[in-house]
Amino acid sequence: MNTVATKLPHAARLLLGLIFFVFGLNGFLQFLPMPELPAPAGSFMGALAATGYFFPVLKATEVVGGLLLLSNRFVGLALVLLAPIVVQIALFHIVLTPGQIALSVVLLGLEAYLGFAYRDAFRGVLTAKLRPKAGEEAPARHRARAAA
C-alpha cells in the first residue's frame, strides 16, 4: 500500500486531536484572543455562557476528545464525542458567521475522513437491524467471577 495512504489517517487524527486539544484548553486558559463576532453570534454565545455550565462541559469534552485522538486510544469514542461538536461548529459558522467558515470546513473534512478511515469501529452502530444477544451463556471467566 502507498506510504501516503498509510500515513494520512494518522496525520488527520493528530491534526484533529491537536485542534480540539488546543481550542479546548483555550476555553479554560484564554491564551488565544476571541475574534469579534457579529451581533447574532455574540448574543448566541452570550446566552450559552450565561448558563454557567455549557462552556466548561464543552471545553472539557474537546480536551478529552483531543487527548484521545492524540494518544491514539479510543479513537472511535473520541470521534463519536466530537461529531456533534463539529456539526454545531459548522452550523454556527454557516448560519451566524458565514465569512468565517474555513476552520469548520477543515473540521468537517477531518471528522468525515476519520469516520471513514475508522469505519470498522462503527459497524455495529450503523447496522440497521440489531438483535440483542439475550439467552447466551456467559464465557467461563465471567461465570467463575459471578460464582465467587
Image (cartoon, rainbow, N blue to C red):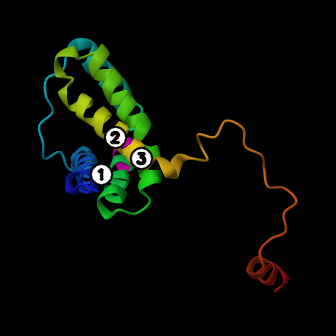
Give the mark, 3 or 2, whose residue is nearer the N terminus: 3
Q: Residues within 10 Å of mark 2 (few under 14, many from 20)?
A: some
Marks 1 & 3, CB-CB < 8 Å contact? no
Q: Amino acid at mark 1?
A: Pro
Q: Position of residue 92 (x, y in %)?
A: 32, 22
Q: Is residue 52 above or below residue 94?
A: below
The residue singled out by tag 1 in the image is 9
Task: Give whichever of discs 1 and 3 has the lower sequence position.
Answer: 1
The vertical placement of 64 against 51, above or below, is below
Q: Position of residue 12 (x, y in %)?
A: 26, 48
Q: Secondary structure at mark 3?
A: helix
- Give the SS element for disc 2: helix
Q: In front: mark 3 or mark 2?
A: 2
> Is residue 138 in view from this perspective?
yes
Quarter of the image for residue 55 reads: top left
Give, as a three-letter code, the residue at label 2: Tyr
Mark 3–mark 2 Cα distance, whole angstroms, equals: 11 Å
Which of these two is toward me, 44 or 10? 10
34 drawn magenta: no
Q: Are marks 3 and 2 in contact (CB under 8 Å)?
A: no
Residue segment shown in magenta: 56-60
Using the image, tell me which numbered label, if any, was put on residue 79.
Answer: 3
Name the residue at 77% across, 46% down.
131
Q: Which mark is residue 124?
A: none
Residue at mark 1 to residue at mark 3: CA–CA distance: 13 Å
Counting residues from the start of the chain, the first of labels 2 and 1 encountered is 1
The number of numbered badges drawn on the structure is 3
- Which of pointers 1 and 3 indicates the residue nearer the eye? 1
Q: What amino acid is at disc 3?
A: Leu
Mark 2 highlights which residue? Answer: 113
Determine contact: label 2, label 1, CB under 8 Å: yes
